[in-house]
Image (cartoon, grey):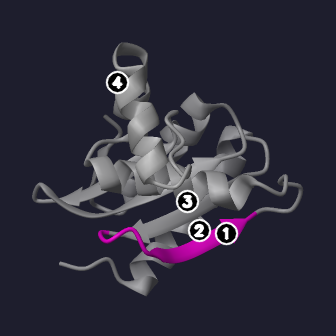
Amino acid sequence: MDLTLNTAQKLAANCLSLAAGMGLKPLTVAVLDSAGNLKVLMRQDGTSTLRPEIAQAKAKGAIALGMGSRAIFERAKEQPYFIQAMNALAGGALVPVPGGVLIRKNGAILGAVGITGDSSDNDEACAIRAIEDAGFTADAG
C-alpha cells in the first residue's frame, strides 16, 4: 500500500487540528512517503523560517533509519558517533529528537510524519495521535 496524496493531506490537516486542541505553538508538519519524498508540507502562521527543513529532517531520518526519531534520539545518547556519521551521510539533514514518527500498516513503513514548533514531546504526541486516528500504526521508536 502506498501513502496517497489524499491520505497525506488528511494526516497533515489532522495534526494541525489536534495541535489546536492541545494548545500547541504554531507547527510545521511534513508528511513523507516510504522513499522519503515530501508529499505534504503545512506550515502554520507564526512559525520560524527553518521549521520546514526541521520537520522534513525528523521524518526523513525516521524513514532512513527505519525507526522513529525518539529511538534515534536515544541512540544518539548511546552512540553519538554513529548518529553523527548518519547525519553526515544525510547531508546534515538528520534531526535526532522526537517528532518524527513512522506510519506503518501491517508492519510495513508507508511513510513518516515530522512535526516541529512546540516541544519535541508535544510534536511527537501530535503526530502519533494523527497517525492512529487515520487507522495506521504510529512508530515513534
Residue 3 location, quadrant? bottom left
Q: What secondary structure is found at the residue carrying circle 4?
A: helix
Packing grade of label 4 (10 A; few <14, some 14-19, many >=20) is some
For marks 4 and 1, give the CA distance: 29 Å
Given residues 34 and 89, the one toward you in this image is 89
**Mark 4 or 1: the one toward you:** 4
At 40% from the left and 33% from the top, the residue drawn is 83
**Mark 2 or 3: the one toward you:** 3
Which of the marked residues, 2 or 3, is nearer the chain's N terminus? Answer: 2
Which of the marked residues, 3 or 1, is nearer the chain's N terminus? Answer: 1
Q: Which amino acid type corresponds to the residue marked 2 in the rendered image? A: Ala
| Residue corresponding to mark 2 | 13
| Residue corresponding to mark 1 | 42
| Residue corresponding to mark 4 | 75
Looking at the image, residue 45 sits to the left or right of residue 111; the answer is right
**Mark 3 or 1: the one toward you:** 3
Q: Which residues are magenta?
A: 34-43
- Look at the magenta stretch and give its main secondary structure: strand
| Residue corresponding to mark 3 | 56
